[in-house]
Image: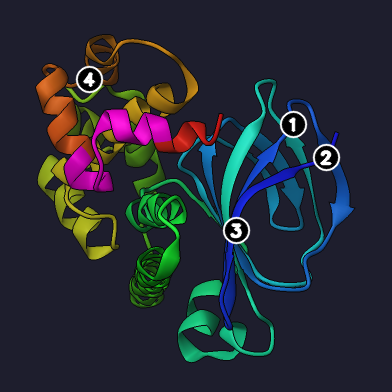
Amino acid sequence: MVPVIEREERFREFSVRCVRYPAGLTQMPHAHPEPRLCLILRGTLAETSAAGAVNAGAWSLAVKPPGVEHSDSFGPTGTRILSVLFATERGATSAEARTSLGRWQWLDDGTGARPGVAALAALTVGGTAGRNAIAAAVRALLHELQERERRRAVATSPPWMALALAALERDNGGPGAVSRAAGAAGVHRVTLARRLRRHGKGSARGRLCWLRVRRAAHWLTGTTRPLARIAVEAGFADQSHMCRDVRRTLGVTPGRLRQLAAGPG
């Protein structure tokens, strides 16, 4: 079993590729010579590195500096990943790339999702228009990461923030979700909302919207469930509500997202 590169575009400072990893594939400890970003489009993987062990699913983004040893095990249905590989002699030496790619981490807060979808869509276009769109998407992705690192540098999250975020994650986003999360963390809902913004995690409403969109995107790309059923199970009022939020968050309709994530064939 070997990974299959389905699509790839090469630029002077980076390359962008879609890779399909077979179900059950295990990669022994290895390190990459170049910095890279990896956005899971479909499926899951379990990764172990010096930074710890992570079980990552669809729409999680990995930031991988060069030379960090890690091992990967891919899920039972296979995994499809969009990767951006930065040339060590050019892209990785720019100030923006150094700021964005200097720390090994997995992100599941929506960072990179919209530009990642844009890059994925542009890969299917080809020609000058497609290449220009890919380059713009990579710049937007780096900018999002740079802004996230900047906010992180000036504000350290309080210990209770993890409890609040975990409670939001478990909640299906119905009425009172923010109050329930604040109660789980032992703070007032206004305090939670204020700290979410201060620590670069967006508004409470925006966070709940992303969690609903992520749940929907997971089922859109990993199952054949009807859109109406996904909308209800993800916590939306109805299918129209889901379509609006998915398009506003990811830049494409649910149907187009399902098509892009499925890949060729």
What residue is rendered at 49% in x and 23% in y? 222
Per the image, label 2 sits on a secondary structure element best described as: loop
Residue 210 visible in the snapshot: yes
Q: Quadrant of the C terminus?
A: top right
Given the image, on which type of amino acid does mark 3 rest? Glu
Q: Mark 1 or mark 2, which has the lower sequence index?
A: 2
Q: Are marks 4 and 2 in contact (CB under 8 Å)?
A: no
User: How far across and how far down the image is residue 176, in percent?
Assistant: 12, 25
- The residue stretch that appears in magenta: 247-259
> Chief secondary structure of the magenta span?
helix
What residue is rendered at 45% in x and 42% in y? 59
Q: Which mark is residue 22?
A: 1
Given the image, on which type of amino acid does mark 2 rest? Val
Given the image, on which type of amino acid does mark 1 rest? Pro
Q: CA distance from mark 1 to mark 4?
A: 31 Å
Q: Which residue is mark 2?
A: 2
